[in-house]
Image (cartoon, rainbow, N blue to C red):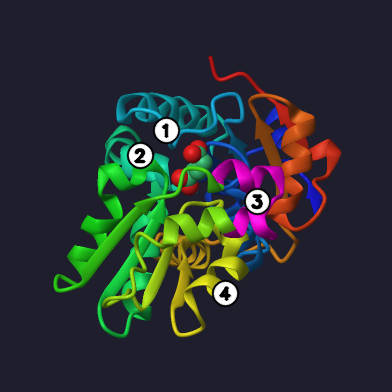
Amino acid sequence: MSNYSFEAALRKGQVLQNSEKPIGIFDSGVGGLTVFKAISELLPNENLLYLGDTARVPYGTRSRETIRKYTEMAAARLTDYNIKMLVIACNTATSASLPGLESRFPDLLVAGVIEPGAAAACAATSRGHIGVIATEATIRGQAYQKAIGRILPKATVVAKACTLLVPLAEEGWIDGPIAENVAQKYLSEIFTGADDPDTLLLGCTHFPLFRNILQKLTGPAVRIVDSALATASLVREMLAQACLLNQSAAPGSRQFFTTDNRERFMATGGHFLGELMPDAGVRLINLQ
Ligand code: DGL
């Protein structure tokens, strides 16, 4: 992972081509690193900035107004870095804030994770019966239910908030009997044994870490879908359409911002990223 040179370029007053500007990726904490990773793998030459609001995570149990306020503050901070695109890599924040962000930053490409995740689930389903698991706020806001309904109006969607899976993932308890029991308790309300979903959509950044357990509990016939890969494809498509894909052959740089407890962000973030975070590339910032 290369260290980030974009800030140095800014300090030196260098003028960057539009396509060389970074992509700003936001999440309430470390979960969005699953999306960051997918973007980084699909677009290795892009310069990436990641902001995790660890001071205020979790967003998933907060009110819509608070989630909007926090997300807008974070997005505004990322725009200070002259980004060419903003990716809301958090389901909860996308669900509450995406339309507001699109109108607040009309000159910026803005993508969220809900539409690509819903499209991936609609492509995967065989009978149009989709289970969605996410945070309380995402389920309450019905963003996935509405997005699926727009793509596949005849789909049946059953949704369940799985609040406890978020702290379990952050603790690294992603397998074993505790995680399995908690997941089983939640899934039993969706998979009741009668006309069960054929597809399970993981509508929270943390849930891909439980993929093995979830697949074991649902059985191999159920297709499990998450939005990270689909979001990365959407990002590439939007940049290509706007002629903003970075043409440089050099590997892109990566910089991480966190709003609290840099050490914990690095340790927990490593699980989500699947590799150690570079110490020099992680900076503590204040959004107030
Ligand atoms: N990143 C959030 C999401 O995808 C989960 C963590 C939180 O509740 O803030 O919904």
Q: What residue is pinned by disc 1?
A: 61
Camera-side mark, 2 or 3: 2
**Residues at marks 2 and 1 touching, judged by CB atoms closer than 8 Å:** yes
Vertical relation: 180 (above or below) 53:
below
Q: What residue is pinned by disc 3?
A: 47
Residue in the image at 71% along x and 49% along y:
172
Residue at far left of view: 154
Mark 3 Cα-neighbour bin, 10 Å: few <14, some 14–19, many ≥20: many
Vertical relation: 43 (above or below) 11:
below
Q: Secondary structure at mark 4?
A: helix
The answer as to whether callout 1 falls within 8 Å of ligand 1 is yes
From mark 2 to mark 1, how far is it between C-alphas? Answer: 6 Å
Mark 2 Cα-neighbour bin, 10 Å: few <14, some 14–19, many ≥20: many
- Dot 2 or dot 3, earlier in sequence: 3
Q: Secondary structure at mark 3?
A: loop
Residue in the image at 36% along x and 68% along y:
191
> Residue 54, image x and y in percent?
61, 30
The answer as to whether callout 4 falls within 8 Å of ligand 1 is no
The answer as to whether callout 2 falls within 8 Å of ligand 1 is yes
From mark 1 to mark 4, how far is it between C-alphas? Answer: 27 Å
- Dot 1 or dot 3, earlier in sequence: 3
> Residue 22, image x and y in percent?
59, 46
- Dot 2 or dot 4, earlier in sequence: 2
